[in-house]
Image (tube, grey):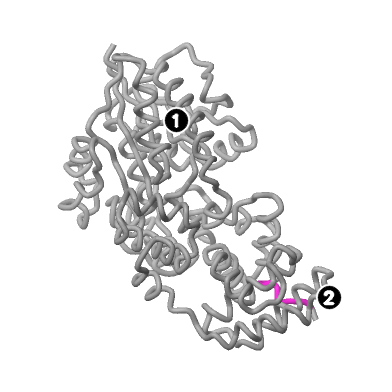
Amino acid sequence: MPASPARAAAFQILMRIERDASYASELLHSDAISKLSNRDHGLTTELLMGVLRWRSLLDDYVRASSSEKLTRLDPEVLASLRIGAYQLRFLSKVPARAAIFESVELVKGAKKKSAASFVNAVLRKIDKKGAEDYRSAIGSSADTAELARNAAHPEWLVERWVTRYGLEAVRKLCLQNQSVPATSLSIRNHSMSSEEQLAAEGVTLSPGEIVSSARRVLAGDVTQTKSFRHGGIYIQDEASQLVALLAALPATTAATILDCCAAPGSKTSLIANRNPRSRVLAMELHPHRARLLRRLTRESNVSIVVADARSMPFSERFERILADVPCSGTGTLGHNPEIKWRLKQEDLADLQAKQIAILKSAMNQLTIEGRILYSTCSLELEENEDVVKAACADSTNFAVLEISPELDRLRASGDLAPTLVGNWPSLVEGPFLRTIPGVHPCDGFFAALIERRA
């Protein structure tokens, strides 16, 4: 008997992530997965993201219940064990017999029938351990090593965070990373009719907690709505929306704006929407991502350019540039948990070199008194403050501006959510914007504002 469609889909995606370094968020919206029923799609998402969030802890359970070393197990066998262990330890509504039976069927379907009895035996041992109280375990972790294990994070990553932010903040950060994140929406041309349309299609919303125009999904699948399919709504974290608002100019301004690392385009679209009198150039290195950018960006004042941000092909200069550079993504582990298993500490140096090159290139494209908003969705010093310092070190023509007046401008214009208005200084670290998951109700973002003086 084949495994259920939901478990088979989760298994196949896990194998692709391991084999091709694919991203779960993209594969969950592939054509093959879209054919699943809503119920099966929900279970696939739960299993896939659960396994990715808790992988190291699930491996500990397998290791303690197996006579074989994990390194000796075939990838298909290990994936089926992780799926089974996740259900046994985290999903109380799934009967143990179903979790075990389905994992056995997964290895059979993967032509690993000889491992069926092994998978059955290991999962039966894991079943005797009971459910996992992960919130309590994370909250009571006494040191870095214990927190890393209980929160299923690489210890090197937790250690650097604790050094930077302190143990209590990192407990909150890890707990947020291990929880299902809220779905935040950016609604273009915001009106009650948009929300009424979503409500008619079964989507229940609540107000944003960072950006006043944002909405959070309480219930329903927004991706199945007409508004989403027609491009009026973007799924976009509130910190990402805040960065786009900081990069935008006053709506009455007519200027030329560059988004130099633009795909997939949610920030580009928001900037263009806020600046209808401005011309927005959206640059992307890879042609296939540029095509995605064109498809998702509906505003008529956006032009797409395929080019490398480290060597820009423009003779003109820009009044405003957004340099939202490729980064490690450690601020987005709630949405992209696979990142923590791929990233190595030595990767940060390579990323930093690219980020400095992009920022310096962008600085050369600024007009006098023009401004760059440099941003990442990383929590790492090397990709944030260190990049800004390195890029500005060789020139006295550029100055890092305080971000606080820009946030105060957004407060005055009503762009900050009412719940944040009195607490927006918590987003400021020195002259920079800094959001931390768990401490703030959003992904982790960094932003620095740089002005050209001469």
- Let me know if residue 354 appears in the view: yes
Q: Is residue 6 magenta?
A: yes
What residue would you read off at disc 2? 113
Q: Quadrant of the C terminus?
A: top left
Q: Nearer the viewer, residue 193 or 169?
A: 169
- Asked if residue 416 lies left or right of residue 314, the reply is left
What residue would you read off at disc 1? 259
Mark toward the viewer: 2 or 1 = 2
The picture quadrant where one finds residue 146 is bottom left
Q: Secondary structure at mark 1?
A: strand
Q: Nearer the viewer, residue 26 or 62?
A: 62
The image shows residue 172 at horizontal and vertical percentages of 34, 62
Circle 2 Cα neighbour tier, 10 Å, few/some/many (<14 / 14–19 / ≥20): some
Q: Earlier in the sequence, mark 2 or mark 1?
A: 2
- Asked if residue 184 lies left or right of residue 119, the reply is left
The image shows residue 286 at horizontal and vertical percentages of 62, 33
Q: Quadrant of the N terminus?
A: bottom right
Do tag 2 and tag 1 residues touch (Cβ < 8 Å)?
A: no
Amino acid type shown at disc 1: Asp
Residue drawn at x 20%, y 38% is 404
Q: Secondary structure at mark 2?
A: helix
Q: Is residue 218 above or below residue 194?
A: below
Specify start and end residues of the magenta stretch as a single range.
Answer: 2-7
Q: Is residue 123 above or below residue 53?
A: below
- Let me know if residue 182 appears in the view: no
